[in-house]
Image (spheres, coloured by chain):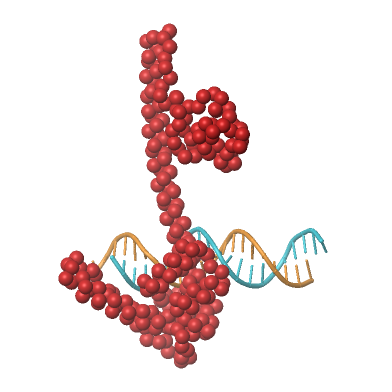
Chain colours: A red, B orange, C cyan
Amino acid sequence: MYMAQEDVDLALGLSVGSGTGKPHLLQPKEAPPLEPSLTLSLTIAVKREKVEEENKRAMIYYSAASSAADDDIEGCNNSGSSRKKLKLTKEQSALLEGRFKEHSTLDTKQKTALARQLNLRPRQVEVWFQNRRARTKLKQTEVDCELLKRCCETLTEENRRLHLELQQLHHQQQRHPTAAFFMPAAAMLSVCPSCNRLAPAPPAHAAAAADRPASKRSASARQLYPHKDRHASMN
DNA sequence: ACATATGGACTGTTTACCTCA
DNA sequence: TATGAGGTAAACAGTCCATAT
């Protein structure tokens, strides 16, 4: 662990004694659960505040104990010694979240300043940001996955519908081979692959114009294929 | 009491950058 | 000047595990 003593002092605003014994660990107490009853809620809110205040103090002791423990096991893996775990207060979490919203990474100066502001070690701030990035990414992957799943379902359904429509057309053509048929409604529409919106099939001149750069396109062609240039650049 | 979820902390790997021979 | 080796720091992926629910 690269944690220096000044980091501890920085975090605590005091010096940790250099004795061999670890400081007494003040474990945070569990806050009472919120009651649905309105009459009780105020009392409980007050209790919760008290408990949080206690937790805050416990955290400071905890920090010191943790740092001392870190020093003890420096250079060793932590097998055998139980891993200490910090519980961030609401204020600390809120500040970290706020900073993360602004920027998901921190440079060394920002990290140190934020750690000082939070009464945490820079390493703890660093780890928090690492975990936050990892978990944000995971959440985003889940969202993307769900989106793709729904997109796939929609396309499958659309495919099934078009197959059915095609079948019906074949049947009609077999029954009346010489008759001329109108194009099905779906064939008269085109889908913009970027915004996924249906647009009426453009007249031939507009479609040709859509292949020209945006600056040389007519207003109608631009309206029909608003994302044409983006598509080209993506390919 | 137990199962599960959450999130702080860790290890190992990759990548970018710098220095130096 | 260009280049490869070695060192360093930061980010990331994967995991552990204490704690909360």
Does the rendering let one see residue A80?
A: no
Q: Against A121, is A205 above or below?
A: above
Q: How far across and down, in percent of the image, does residue A132 sit?
A: 45, 63
- A77 or A169, nearer to the observer: A169
Pick out the residue farthest to the top: A178
Q: How far across and down, in percent of the image, does residue A24 sit?
A: 37, 86
Which residue sits at x=21%, y=75%? A43
Q: How far across and down, in percent of the image, does residue A74 sit?
A: 52, 80
Which residue sits at x=49%, y=39%? A194
Q: Quadrant of residue A81?
A: bottom left
Which residue sits at x=53%, y=39%? A227
Q: Quadrant of residue A66?
A: bottom left
- B20 or A187, nearer to the observer: A187
Q: Against A5, is A168 above or below?
A: above
Q: Is residue A113 left or right of residue B7?
A: right
- A27 or A206, nearer to the observer: A206
Name the image quarter holding the C terminus of chain A: top right
Q: Quadrant of residue A187?
A: top left
Does the rendering let one see residue A127?
A: yes
Which residue sits at x=41%, y=35%? A155
